[in-house]
Image (cartoon, rainbow, N blue to C red):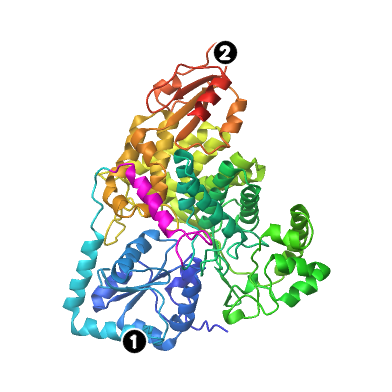
Amino acid sequence: MKDDKFTNRLIHEKSPYLLQHAHNPVNWYLWGEEAFETARKHNKPVFLSIGYSTCHWCHVMARESFEDPEIADMLNEKFVAVKVDREERPDIDAVYMEACQMMTGTGGWPLTVITTPEGEPFFAGTYFPAEDRAGMPGLKTILERVALLWERDPGTVIETAGDVVRALKKQSRPGDVGLEIVERAFEALKRGFDRTHGGFGSGQKFPVPQHIHFLLRHHIKRKDEVALEMVNLTLERMRYGGIYDHLGYGFHRYAVEPSWTIPHFEKMLYDQALILTAYLDAFSVTGRELYRDTSLEITEYVLRDMQSPAGGFYSAEDAESEGVEGKYYLWRASEIRELLGDEAPLVMSYFNVLEDGNFAGELRGENILHVRSPEKVAEEYGITTDELRERIDNARRVLLERRLERTPPSRDDKVLTDWNGLMIGALARCHRITGSPEALKSSRKCLGFIRNNLWVDGRLMHRYREGEAAIGGSLDDHAFLIWGLLEMYDATFKEKYLKMALELSEVLKENFMAPDGGFYFTNDSCGLIVRRKDSLEGAIPSGNSVHMLNLLRLGSILEDDELTGMARGIVSAFASRIKSAPSAHTFLLSHLEWALKGGRSLTVICPHTPGILEGLRRELIPDFTITLKDEASDWSFAPGHLRSKGMVNGKCTYYLCDPEKCYPPSTDDNEILEYIRGV
């Protein structure tokens, strides 16, 4: 049982992650002036530990090291220890994660960094065991060596830290980017593609939904069937793999091996939003029922388990329950037979359940559910795939009911504006493509929550928990919420969402825009050693990539060339980084042609939604926007030339533009459809 006889400053925080460490014997400081002033006063290096509440290896390091009195004594005597929730403070995490990657070639969480009293890093890594293990130095050894080095040769340490900071301050060189870089990105994805299991790479498998986003648009624009094959294999194997929760739905964080079978079990809100969007787009392109069903299942999961009664979406669910990773999700064959009786053999065959278990490690003998080919199982049992689906769904409900009796993983219940913006957008798109009324209702409820709780005195905030909104909004908070608002507009054609998106875009322009193009992550330096301006895409697209698309959409919908010019400025600002790592910019490159050559737009003046729009907005048409304007509604925020467009002869009137010209207004539905689908 955990000993809570120690209590430190973290006890007063709202962050679930910080509260997890509030009873460590480590004298943790919060990130801020008190910590660094103490370090300067006592001439101590700063031990910076960054993680998040549902991080498995963060839990392991906490148990092994931060609850160890001997290690705590070393940290308290020789260092100033600072604990940061990377989800609350992504700005801090981004700076020191880049330093870690620069110094070690890798990164991850927990992030372990040692800095000078000025916050300049000179040592970095991720998880370390308490004691030396298998060639890896333990944390005790590291702390002893660093403390000795700081005492004997602080000048060398400070010089090393200065070199790291100078490297961090190097910005991408502005320049021109041509469309050939799109093909380079595609070739890089093809080289890294796993043709057996789908996905990218040969080790751990991350979903990387922005690659799917890129490949679908590449397929449509270039008529490239290879791109679509890559999408289909990846999405199918992900859906059938153990990375998918086949009982409660939703995707786990990643797979620890290439076949998508054994997941790292935590569930993140942003993964659900981005993967949902990927399956929706794939359904739009292919019409495959598997993709539609998966989309609706993810939606069911997030509405059931991740949305608060007030409307905001929680951040994540842990990988662990009862201190063991994956315990909540695993099954013994005997338990399935007990619950399902005569149906057990079929269900066990379908889900690859073995008598001796298919899961290694601490829970040997347990099974992770993952799907064989439904067609093969149906053939073996002499039934149709529809009958198989019905029987599996009945069994799923029985197994889920039993699973609900187990101790569930903990949930991080803070609400983050950026991740909620992604979910608002994904749910609005779900409504637009599948017609789900629940998805639209929940996206509206979430937006209302943000406006009521995270919009404080005219300023967007980043985090809400237990009645408190805190931490000024970043580029991602604004950009991802704008993306959500534009998806709401596409789903409803209500101009109030455009107006709000435009207002937030103005905030970014005034407070985050860099003189040479692109946007800083924060509106000032926030006391960090560098003010970041980045375009690289990791688990999620960068704020700059997303806002480039926002600006293109707003510029096209509102016919505002200044907005599209800012989008081109983002491309130019990050030219050298895009050229050096095209496959790390796939979301941005999905829309490069739009930025450089222009897109197509359809403005419809009509008091109702014409029938042709219902079909068009369910399709994936790259570089294309639809504006629906009722002459009687308030478009005072739009440019004058858009406001002046009206109906011809009292009929719904269509105004079409492409990169070369605008066409005369038309009232002929068929003419419009022929143009849009025929080009």
Asked if the stretch drawn in magenta spans residue 197, the answer is yes
Residue 263: in sight, yes or no? yes
Residue at disc 1, secondary structure: helix
Bounds of the magenta segment: 177-202
Asked whether, in this view, residue 39 is left or right of residue 626, the answer is left
- Report the Cα–Cα distance between label 2 and label 1: 80 Å
Location of residue 272 in the rendering, given as x and y in whole percent from the top left corner: 55, 55
Residue 502, picture quadrant: top left
Q: Residue at x 29, y 51 (%)?
A: 579
Residue 609: in sight, yes or no? no
**621, above or below 559, in the image:** below
**134, above or below 562, in the image:** below
Label 1: few (<14), some or many (≥20) within 10 Å? few
In the current view of this chain or complex, which residue is farthest to the top? Answer: 649
Report the disc number at residue 141: 1
Asked whether, in this view, residue 592 is left or right of residue 467, the answer is left
Residue 142 or residue 150, whichever sits in front: 142
Asked if the stretch drawn in magenta spans residue 206, the answer is no
Label 2: few (<14), some or many (≥20) within 10 Å? few
Residue 531 or residue 391, whichever sits in front: 391
Location of residue 194 in the rendering, given as x and y in whole percent from the top left corner: 48, 61
Location of residue 427 in the rendering, given as x and y in whole percent from the top left corner: 58, 46
Residue at disc 2, secondary structure: loop
Quadrant including the N terminus? bottom right
**644, above or below 575, in the image:** above
Report the disc number at residue 506: none
**Residue under numbered circle 2:** 650
- Amino acid at circle 2: Gly
Q: Residue at x 60, y 40 (%)?
A: 433
